[in-house]
Image (tube, coloured by chain):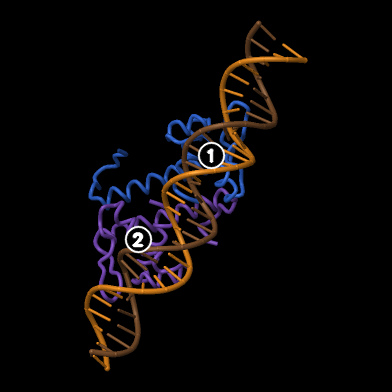
Chain colours: A blue, B purple, C orange, D brown
Amino acid sequence: MSLSQIEYFVAVAEQGHVGRAAAKLCIAQPAVSRQIRRLEDELGKSLFVRTPRGMKLSEAGAIFLRRARAILESVQEAANEVRGTARCTRTS
Amino acid sequence: MSLSQIEYFVAVAEQGHVGRAAAKLCIAQPAVSRQIRRLEDELGKSLFVRTPRGMKLSEAGAIFLRRARAILESVQEAANEVRGTARCTRTS
DNA sequence: GGCGTCCAATACCGTTTGGATCTCGCGTTC
DNA sequence: GAACGCGAGATCCAAACGGTATTGGACGCC
């Protein structure tokens, strides 16, 4: 599992579409698609329900989403804190 | 920044030696060395003070260590929770 | 029912990243 | 000053990642 995978996962969860998420992340759709799949493989569970209209979070996906967001936020905070920009939790 | 980098960082911090940490992680010493360096580059701060006797945590390193541990733990928990091993925080 | 659209998944390829091995440089120790 | 312990650099190779092109399935429209 990698941070990018988590990042991609959150993006797809938020957008509901792999393609949409890819656009937002500024990378190609297949890259996102593949990383999501690997993440699911590693976790041994489907994170999304594939519909012909896009991707819908599965139950496991919903659980993971909260954790994923927390992780990304922690990483941000850690980086900021070390860089000296501790203060508040400004995400940019 | 990647999860492996964080993992390596924690290992080095705990061991006080790059070589020692590498052995524990079952990878070669230069690999760890490089990842630590990249992490430092990315954060723009030295995480360790290099001594002829090993590596000592710098102030920034000490700060980051707490965060790093928390992040790794979060990732573990997230994975466990999704896999169905939600219960307590059993790490295995 | 055939066609165009919209979606994700797959195949293939070039590039990048990560690890292994070998080597060097610097201190310490005797 | 020779030997040891330690981290860092250089080089090579394999695995991972991302991009382009393409396929396959479901839906809407004519």
Which residue is located at x 25 percent, y 48 percent? A86
Residue linked to disc 2:
B36
Across and down, in percent, residue A27 comes to 45, 36
Question: Which amino acid, mark 2?
Answer: Ile
Determine whether the residue tagged by mark 1 lies in a helix, strand or loop. helix
Across and down, in percent, residue D7 comes to 32, 69
Marker count (numbered):
2
Q: Residues within 10 Å of mark 1 (few under 14, many from 20)?
A: some
From this viewpoint, is residue B3 visible? Answer: no
Q: Residues within 10 Å of mark 2 (few under 14, many from 20)?
A: many
Which residue is located at x 44 percent, y 68 percent? B28
Question: Residue A17 got which mark?
Answer: none
Residue A22 is left or right of residue A87, and the answer is right
Across and down, in percent, residue A89 comes to 30, 42
Question: Which amino acid, mark 1?
Answer: Ala
Residue linked to disc 1:
A62
